[in-house]
Image (tube, grey):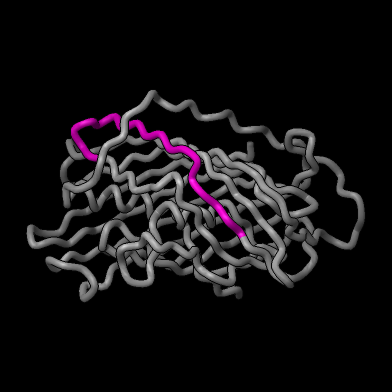
Amino acid sequence: MILMRCSIASYALPLLIGLELILGCGTTTSTSRAVKPSVLAPEAIKVVGEIGWSPRQLSGSRKYFIHDSSIVSVSTDTSQTRSTETSTFYSVRVSRSSDSFVLMAKVDSLLTTSQSPSLKAPVNIDPAREFRTILSATGQLFLPAQDSTSLCPDGVTPAAARIYELVLSYPERALKIGDSWTDTVSTTVCRSKIPLHQRAIRIYQILSFTTWNQQSAVIISRNVSSILSTDSKQIPNHLGVAGSGESSTFIYANQATGVLLQSDTRSQSTLAVRTSRGVFPFRQIISTHIELH
């Protein structure tokens, strides 16, 4: 099992929306409604060679479009529901450094539309700031994202955490159709001074080989189980958070490098926020589409 320190931000960012429904803090950004790109249908093809698939990272630059559609609701109060859509463009640059790679990424633009304008959307992204991490040739993360803007101990901002949705990790062995592997990831994502700890178990499986926009690609499934919590000693006013979630993802990756080409994720989570006013249960459903541009 590979132990890494990174993030499944598709859980963490919407969970922070739930926190803000209770705490009433944040800022609002309103724009025209984003249109979600269509999902490509898989087209199976035969793979050349019988020794298995061994992708390897290469230096280069690329840009990703991320579209999130989330519904967060207070389980005991149906009037407290938010539907939010966010479109984000990330630039990613990978360069070789000895026997590893340096990954630099930044948010180029972010547009958010909320169907509940009376509720505040937690947008906390500096489009000009670049984040940095180190990864191996197979995409394993050696260091968490270095993020000087984080306001909580040993944590990163949601913007920095999302870098890791753009990186796929593979085992140090050749893979064939039907092969699977597992890794465990842990991280702390900050919203203001509130640290949200997350531990996730991710199970991958090779489904088939195909083409994506005239590129040779591999189709991978990823199922994630996640546990979330806060340390009451680190946050004020006796605030506490506990939750769990599950997600499933359909991934296209480049056959030569293993680089992410496209992914579609569907996740569901439950969250209990404890404050001096009581315990507030939340439920969330999230759809995330990522595509190489």
Q: Is residue 84 above or below residue 91?
A: above
Which residue is painted at 80% across and 52% down in the image? 256
Locate residue 176 relative to residue 143 in the image: left or right.
right
Question: Residue drawn 13% across and 61% down?
Answer: 275
Query: Considering depth in this image, is 3 or 97 the residue closer to the camera?
Result: 97
Give the vertical position of 196 relative to 78 (above or below).
below
Quadrant of res 52: bottom right
Work out which quarter of the rendered image holds the C terminus and state it.
top right
* Residue 31 belongs to the span the image colors magenta: no
Q: In the rendered structure, which segment of residues is drawn in magenta?
A: 103-120
Instruction: Identify the image quadrant of residue 44.
Output: top right
Please state the horizontal and vertical placement of residue 167, each as a whole percent of the image: 60, 56
Q: Is residue 38 above or below residue 28?
A: above
Q: Is residue 228 left or right of residue 193?
A: right
71 and 23: which is toward the camera: 23
Identify which residue is drawn at 74% across, 33% down.
213
Q: Residue furthest left?
A: 277
* Residue 199 position in % (x across, y down): 43, 68
The reply to whether the magenta stretch includes residue 108 is: yes
- Residue at 78% from the left image edge and 39% from the top image edge: 215
